[in-house]
Image (cartoon, rainbow, N blue to C red):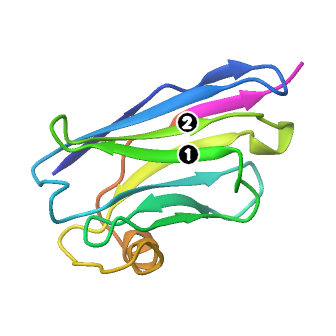
Amino acid sequence: VQLQASGGGLVQPGGSLRLSCAASGFTLDFYTIGWFRQAPGKEREGVSGISSSDGSTYYADSVKGRFTISRDKAKNTVYLQMDTLKPEDTAVYYCATDYPRLSITAAQAMDNMALSDYWGQGTQVTVSS
């Protein structure tokens, strides 16, 4: 099982970035990929996830209305479109999977992903003028 995250970078406040997480070793038909982030001196927080079971989505309150998660099952890849970025979005972003746990809702998937042994390598997102 591998997760390959990409797409981070430096962007000005109000700008956009799209993160990608390509998975191998399991299929998005049954398992979920989501995004977490960790800023310096802060605890890791769940950002967004999309359930493979019911298609429901989870967004942290801090990103609702600005971030959009989507998936391409043919490419076994999940994307996080981040718009209207703020300096407080600066963090290392990690993707994770709930594999081998099965989740029903996106919220449940986020809990399972937090316990996961499988994480992407992290991609830095810096929002600064």
Q: How would you rate the neighbour count of disc 2 (Cα within 10 Å): few for under 14, some for 14-19, many for 20 or more? A: some
- The residue type indicated by label 2 comes to Gln
Residue in the picture at 38% in, 73% down: 109
Mark 1 packing: few (<14 Cα in 10 Å), some, or many (20+)?
A: some
Find residue 11 and report its image quarter.
top right
125 falls in the magenta region: yes
Q: Which mark is residue 81?
A: 2
The image's mark for residue 68 is 1
Q: Is residue 32 magenta?
A: no
Residue 21: give x, y in percent of width and height.
35, 39
Give residue 80's position: percent from left, percent from top.
Answer: 50, 41
Q: Are marks 2 and 1 in contact (CB under 8 Å)?
A: yes
Left or right: residue 1 versus residue 11 is left
Residue 93 lies left or right of residue 112; in this view the side is right
State which region is magenta: 124-129
81 sits left or right of 113 in the view: right
